[in-house]
Image (cartoon, coloured by chain):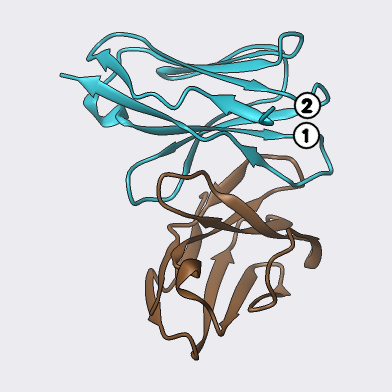
Chain colours: A brown, B cyan
């Protein structure tokens, strides 16, 4: 089983809203990732958690706040987003650092 | 120089033929290499990974890695219309560094 589950699949939020994206995996993977993907572009890394600790923050604006409550869950808290933040947000996990990563189905976010 | 380069295509291949996708990378110390397939509006799906020089085969797919020349390729035999997608090459600089770097992707179209 190589399933990474993301919820919700679609999200529309206003610029003053607070929302959260959720990601779950039960493969025992110890690295989890958030990526952002704009149309016709490759995924861009946002955050990496390794063994439930934040190991990489790619200079992401503070309106995006990641959280890793346990080894199976990863959240991305959103606050005061801008329309240009509209994108496909992808969660991924891998067994260890540098090994093959599996993506969830993504959350299509629209900021209005 | 981009870290991971791919020909953006589109690459058109007749059904039943071999599709050949290429990727070059700049970091000579890179250790792990991945091919993802992404259908329009969907998330990337891992189809092959390779860590050692040489060929790795899985069904109709063969990944080829040449570290001396810093390229990795993906061959798809007996191409099917369902193979039409964007193929993303991804490279990890070294084990212990989770910063997967993606190429811009090659759009492949299989012509019936």
Q: Residue A66: horizontal and vertical position, in percent?
A: 68, 73
Q: Are marks 2 and 1 in contact (CB under 8 Å)?
A: yes
Please state the chain letter of the residue tagged with numbered disc 1 in the rendered image.
B
* A96 sits to left or right of B84: right
Q: How crowded is the residue under tag 1: few (<14 C-alpha within 10 Å), some, or many (20+)?
A: many
Above or below residue A103? Residue B67 is: above
Q: Residue A47: horizontal and vertical position, in percent?
A: 70, 61
| Front position in the image: A8 or B41 | B41
Q: Quadrant of residue B87?
A: top left
Q: Earlier in the sequence, mark 2 or mark 1?
A: 2
Residue depicted at x 54% and y 74%: A22
* B53 sits to left or right of A91: right
> Considering the numbered disc 1 on the image, is that residue within a helix, a strand or a loop?
loop
Of badges 2 and 1, the one in the foreground is 2
Residue depicted at x 50% and y 76%: A82
Above or below residue A47? Residue B110 is: above
Q: How crowded is the residue under tag 2: few (<14 C-alpha within 10 Å), some, or many (20+)?
A: some
* B24 sits to left or right of B21: right
Q: Quadrant of the C terminus of chain A?
A: bottom left
Residue depicted at x 70% and y 77%: A62
Above or below residue A67? Residue A104 is: above
Q: Quadrant of residue B72?
A: top right
Please state the chain letter of the residue tagged with numbered disc 2 in the rendered image.
B
Residue depicted at x 57% and y 33%: B103
> Considering the numbered disc 2 on the image, is that residue within a helix, a strand or a loop?
loop
> How far apart in space, not on screen, are marks 2 and 1 (Cα)?
7 Å
| Front position in the image: B21 or A24 | B21
Residue receiving disc 1: B93
Residue receiving disc 2: B27
């Amino acid at each position: 089983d190589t399933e990474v589950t993301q919820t919700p699949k679609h999200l529309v939020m206003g610029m003053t809203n607070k929302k959260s994206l959720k990601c779950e995996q039960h493969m025992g993977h110890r690295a989890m990732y958030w990526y952002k993907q704009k149309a016709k572009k490759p995924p861009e890394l946002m955050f990496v958690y390794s063994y439930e600790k934040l190991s990489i923050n790619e200079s992401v604006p503070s309106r995006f706040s990641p959280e890793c409550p346990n080894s199976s869950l990863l959240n991305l808290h959103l606050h005061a987003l801008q329309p240009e933040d509209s994108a496909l947000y992808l969660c991924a996990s891998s067994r260890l650092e540098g090994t093959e990563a599996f993506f969830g189905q993504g959350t299509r976010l629209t900021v209005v | 120089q981009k870290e991971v380069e791919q020909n953006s295509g589109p690459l058109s291949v007749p059904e039943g033929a071999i599709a050949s996708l290429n990727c070059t990378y700049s970091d000579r110390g890179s250790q792990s290499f991945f091919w993802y397939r992404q259908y329009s509006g969907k998330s990337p799906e891992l189809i092959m990974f390779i860590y050692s020089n040489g060929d790795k085969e899985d069904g109709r797919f063969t990944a080829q890695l040449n570290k001396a020349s810093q390229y990795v390729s993906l061959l798809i035999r007996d191409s099917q219309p369902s193979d039409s997608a964007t193929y993303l090459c991804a490279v990890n600089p070294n084990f212990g560094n989770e910063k997967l770097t993606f190429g811009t992707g090659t759009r492949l179209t299989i012509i019936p």
